[in-house]
Each structure stands twice: as structure tokens, then as C-alpha cells.
Amino acid sequence: MRFLEEYRDRRWAQRYARLIARTVTRPWTLMEVCGGQTHAIVRFGIDELLPDEITLVHGPGCPVCVTPVEILDKALYLAAQPGVIFCSFGDMLRVPGSQGDLLRVKAQGADVRIVYSPLDAVRLAQRYPDREVVFFAVGFETTAPANALAVRQAHALGLKNFSLLVAHVLVPPAMEAILRSPANRVQGFLAAGHVCTVMGYEEYRPLARRYRVPIVVTGFEPLDLLQGIYLCVRQLEEERFEVENQYARSVRPKGNREAQRLIREVFEVVPRKWRGMGELPRSGLGLRAPYRQYDAEHKFALYSSGSDEPEDCIAGLVLQGIKKPPDCPAFGTRCTPEHPLGAPMVSSEGACAAYYRYRRRPSEGHGRREEVSASE
Amino acid sequence: MGRLLEGIVSALGGPPLEHRHDGAVLALPLEGGDRAAFTTDSYVVSPLFFPGGDIGKLAVYGTVNDLAMCGARPAYLSVGMILEEGLPWETLERVVESLREAADRAGVYIVTGDTKVVDKGKGDGLFLNTAGLGIVPSGVEVRPSEVRPGDVVLLSGDLGRHGIAILATREGLEFETAIESDCAPLHEPVLRLLAEGVEVHCMRDLTRGGLASALLEIAQSTQLHIEIEETAIPVRPEVQAACELLGLDPLYVANEGRWVTFVPEGEAERALTLLRDYPVSAEACAIGRVLPASEALGGLVTLRTAIGTTRTVDWLSGEQLPRIC
Amino acid sequence: MCLAVPGRIVELQEEGPLARQGRVDFGGLVKTVNLTLVPEARVGDYVLVHVGIAISVVDEREARRVLEFLQQEAPEDLEELRIPEEGG
């Protein structure tokens, strides 16, 4: 596959690794924001190529990890309603609500369907006019244009049986919350390449300046991540704090204007609760008044239960990079991928699940992962 | 009910079914140190019909393959059917026809069976169970405990076709390019290896959970360390592309016509030559080896990635689901 | 958010303002994709597709620069590494 496999070349990867090793002179802590980047790092063993001085902290860029319990509970409630076809991306099926998850509700007979695209949910609504189709609209800015398009299509078709349960979140407020925290250890960021494809990267410049952190917009393939890490580390070594674009083959400084126009038409910025981080002002997207009829919370008169995550779960601290999963008393004992207490243990790119996979790793001279908690 | 069973049984009949008893009485051709192998599996796949196969074909080949993995020549099958009230008769006929065709192709007899009907809503249309009897020749010992450090892991062909074929029938996941299930019987190349005296230590067919699960089961049961090479594992470009789009790892995607064979290093080349003689294993290749147990790595499967790093291959909790992040 | 895969547009189908579609080839697998967000895309272009919708056109020149950059920064590596050719 073109524009994929070239960036997975062994010799180029090793070469980038040597370059990074030559460049570092002291320890640096970097955060990759996006869950897809975490997934690639785990899948390709990228951290094995990095010198010991570099610590990668997995960021909150994954809808699985940050969707709060109360939204999951609303999803579970809607899915269980007779006549509802509840559509969702696969990522959300195992995220625990207060009682169970979507997979369990499905096993109990609810019509829960995994879809690839929100446009498929619109098609379902057309096909089943006497059923209520609800789409679980989670995600960051990357997915917002698709959800906006789905709403516009439903509107153009005059559909009365289609709605979204919206749980959209925005990346810059989350990064700022991390940077503002007194316990923050992150010194440089790999920004989410596909979020920036949509939004551009102008909004990161004030963050880089104010908090004096390099922010490198980075892609998702091994060579992208390695180049992103190199650029970030090079800035840190040179005491520069700028926004750089590694993923220029997809990201333009102003992003995708058409996508942004669509988002602005359908959505507005609202406060949002983040799992483990509490409510952040102006950190999410909600449907604008003209499209309120497509808002499932409005349509089904849902109210917030105020339910919270289990006390044992320190997901919030992990997502901000303040604690590491092995620091959690429930890690690997009460909380495992088979029975997760919190979201970061659910998907393979959740920070806790990623650590869980690494708990026994081949120590061929790269024992860094096994010694992480000790060397803290 | 009697009419239903009559109809099905007459479609599946072979010589032993000519007597309408409650069970089949069989004379097993056991000589000397031959042993009987016995296995069972249930099939609940949805949809019932998918590109490249259906539940009937799966049910026959699945059990035939389980027998083959023990080193047995498959001989007799039973079929149990649980039908949901309201299942169209035509659907049932198609499945029965498929069962018969698959049995013919695999050279096995379906000698006994049962049907039950449950209320609407209590079943997914149709559930099947097949149990199978086979003969393991004297001297053949094929099981995980025979695996030794130094053994080479042979994979019979490319991964992921079945899982993607099933997924692609779902709403919105359709592709223009048709990907068909790799559902197939595996006993012929397996029996050839044994007949030619190749020292086969262990075999495991890949089903749900894919290559990863099959290898993890063996690693766990032997507490040895299995290492595989990502670049050696064949995946068709369309399957690779489908996995990229859906965020799936081909290592965990279901197969129904693939298996792994563990042989001593010295036997690997001969085994591959024999395997490649058969269409179902024409692309057989070596994908890794068994390493001595160590405290850190015993019971684990590791993968050398395309970029030269090494990571552990973990158990999957539940089915792998498409993802967007 | 994250998973977006590159594919080549093999056919454009204009079907209304919100449903500009195209058939996109992902290394041998062809799927219909919504192209509303990339009005500048043409047949032969590569696009990045996220949840069935193209979010950008791949800039092929920038794509090569990931490799060219390494050549610049680390020229002293003796191994001769060839940057993949255009086309194909």
C-alpha cells in the first residue's frame, strides 16, 4: 500500500533511531497525544528504538479513554430502548459504564450495530423508517466533519428518525489542562496528525509559546513517529519552543477549510466532561440550535446522572501523564483488559492496556520498559 | 418433526444411514496400535451464508480439520441442528445440501444426526454441532507436548480471509473487491506429511482468534517461547488493506482453512515441499521457530516486527472489533 | 483521532453537494468513499480516508521529504538507501 509501507522500512527506521540517539544529551519526557499514535508505538515497538533518555507518555487522545461514565450510561440506556438501532464505532463497545458495556447490552438482545462510518447510520435510518437510529458520535476533531456531514445529510433527506449522542472533544484544551497541572512532566508534544489535518495547527502556537514546549504535528507510521520524536528532541536540545509540521503530506497550516466550515455550521464549542479529568470549559462540541432535533439527549430527554468512575481508577492521573499505570494499586490485579475498571485498560492504545502488554518484554539489552517503574 | 428429520437424513445419507436407528453402529478399521480420535464443535456463525461458504461447510470442515490436527484420518461425522421457528425451509435445504457436498469433498460420512426446533427469538436462525470420529495410525503422536526448542513453525497459507469475508457482510463494511472465506478441509496435505514419515510434532488449525491465538495456546501449554517474523507472514494485499481500514491486526483475524505445523529444523524443507503440492497449502512457508523456555519468555509468543523491533503477541480479550482510533 | 488510510481515486461520481463520491483503491481493495471535503481532488490523486470520508489529498512531494530529510540529517551513514520512485 503506497504512502504506508514506505514508512515501515526497517533500515530507514534504524537510521532514524541512530540519529535520535546521537542527538540526545539528557533525559526528555514526550507525550504523543493521539491514541492511534500510541497504537503504532506499541505495534511497531518504537520505544525499543529510542535511547533510554527518552520517555514516552501516552496522552489522552482516544475517545475510549476520555468518554465519561455518564455518557456511556446514556448510551447504554438508549441502546436498551425498544425500537432503537444504536450504532457505534467498534472502539466504544467495551468501555465500561456504571453497569456493563454496550457489548453486554447487545448480548442481552439490544440492537447495537458496529458501523464503519456515521454515513452508514444515516443509511440505516433511511432503510428503517419506523426505527429510531442513534449514532454514538464520539471522537476528536478528526471525526467531527464526518458527523457534521451525517447530520446535514439527514437534514437534507428530511429524516425524523436519526439522532446523534454527541461526546465530541477537542484536543488543545486537553493539552492545556495537562500543561497547566503543577504535576506535569511532559516537555514536548507529538500533536495528533489527523486532528491537525482537519483543524490545521495555528491554535498550537500560543500553547508552545506560553508553556515553552515544542509541539510537532506528527503522523502515524513508524518513520513519521521517529521523525516527529527527532524534531521534538532537537528543539528541546536547542531550547526552541515552536510548532513544527512533520506530517506535511497531509497537514496544511490552516487545515481543511471545507471540513471546518461544515463543523462550524453544525456544531458549537461547549464545556465537556473528560473521564478522569473533570469538566473542561470550551473543550467539546455540541449540536447547534438549528440541529437540536438530531441531538439524542434532547430528543430522548436524557438527564445527567452525575455518575462517576470507580474510585480505584486513577485514569485521570494516567491520562495526564502524572502517574504511570503500574503506580495504580488496581493495575493488573483488579483491573485487567478482561475486566477493566476504567477506560485506559479497555483498548490496546489505552495507556494502561499498553503497559499491561509490556509487563513481560524480551530484555535484549532494551530492558527499559521493564525497568520503567523502578527508574521513576 | 419426524418429517423434518426424514427429509434431512435422506439428503445426508451414506451406507450406514440406511438403517434408521437412533445411533449409527460402525465397524472402525483399527489395527495394531491405531487409536480413535474424537472431537466436537458447535457453529453459530452469522450470517449463515457468506462469500466463500456457509455454516454447513464450516461445520463439516471445522470438525474434519480438528481430527486432522491430531493426525487422524477423518471418517464419520454426526450433525446436530437447532432450528429457530420460522426458519425458511429453503434455507435449511441449502445448508443441508452444503453439508452433504462438504462431506463428499472431505471423504467423510455423516452417519447420524438430530434436529430440534426452538421458539422464534431463541436462536440465530440455525445453530449446528458436528462431532467427528477419525483414526490415528499407530506411531503417530501429534500434540503440543511433542514440541521441542529448535522446531520450525510452518504456516500453510495467507491470513485473514475468513474473518474479513464475514465482517464485510455487515452494513457499511462492504468492499467492491470480494474477499472470500478460506474455509477448506486440511486433512489431505496433513495425512500426506504423516504418510511420508515427516516427523510432525504438533499441528493447530487457525480459527477464531487467528494465528496469534493458535500459537499462544501452544506456547502456554508447553511453556516454551515461540518467535515469529512479521515479514514472513503472508497476507493478501486486499486483506491487508481491509485490516488497515478497519484497524484490525491480521494476526488475530479468523481463518477457516489454515494451520500451523511444528517440525524439527531438519524436516522443514521436506515438509514445505510436500505441503506446496496441495492447493490449500500451496503457499506454505516457515514463519518462525520455537526457542528454549526462559524465565522471562516461557509461555510467550514474540514477533519481530517489520522495522526490526520485537514485541510480545498478547491474548486478545474477546473478539477483535473494528476501530477508528 | 486517528485511523486514516491512503488510497488512490480511480473514479469520481458527483452525486449532489453532500454526496460527492469516488471509488478509491486501497492497495487492491476498492471502496466507495465520500469526497465532499476534498473538492480539489482528482482521479489519480491519493486521499487519506477516515470513517469513509476523505479528509485530505496526499501531497506527494511532501511525502518523499520524510525520507529526503533523513538523507540530509544523517548523510554520514554509509549504507546506500534509495528513496522509492514516484508512480506505481
Image (tube, coloured by chain):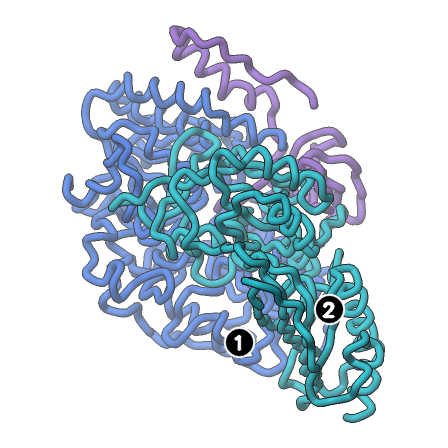
Which chain is cyan in the rendering? B
Instruction: Return the residue nearer the eye: A373 or A231.
Output: A373
Relative image position of residue A136 (x, y in whole percent): 53, 64
Chain of the residue displaying label 1 = A
Q: What element carries label 2?
A: helix
Q: In this view, does A349 lie to the left or right of B84?
A: left
Give the image location of residue A45, x and y in percent: 38, 37
Q: How far apart are marks 1 and 2 (CA)?
A: 24 Å
Q: Position of residue A73 (x, y in %)?
A: 42, 73
Q: Colour of chain C?
A: purple
- Residue at figure coordinates x 58%, y 52% from the top left: A265
The tally of labels here is 2
Quadrant of the snapshot with the C terminus of chain A? top left
At label 1, the amino acid type is Ala
- Residue at label 1? A107
Residue A310 is left or right of residue B125, and the answer is left
The image quadrant where one finds the N terminus of chain A is top right
The residue sitting at 50% across, 29% down in the picture is A8
Q: Quadrant of residue A128?
A: bottom right
Q: Can residue A63 be seen in this view?
A: no
**Quick check: A39 left or right of A317?**
right
Q: Which residue is pictured at 31% across the width and 45% down the height? A: B293
Is residue C74 positioned above or below C33 on the image? above
Q: Which amino acid does label 2 sit on?
A: Gly
- Residue located beneath label 2 in the image: B56
Image height check: is B99 above or below C43? below
Counting from the top left corner in percent of width and height, residue B88 is at: 81, 81
Is the residue A374 above or below the residue B29 in the image? above
For numbered disc 1, what is the local secondary structure? Answer: helix
- Give chain A's shade: blue
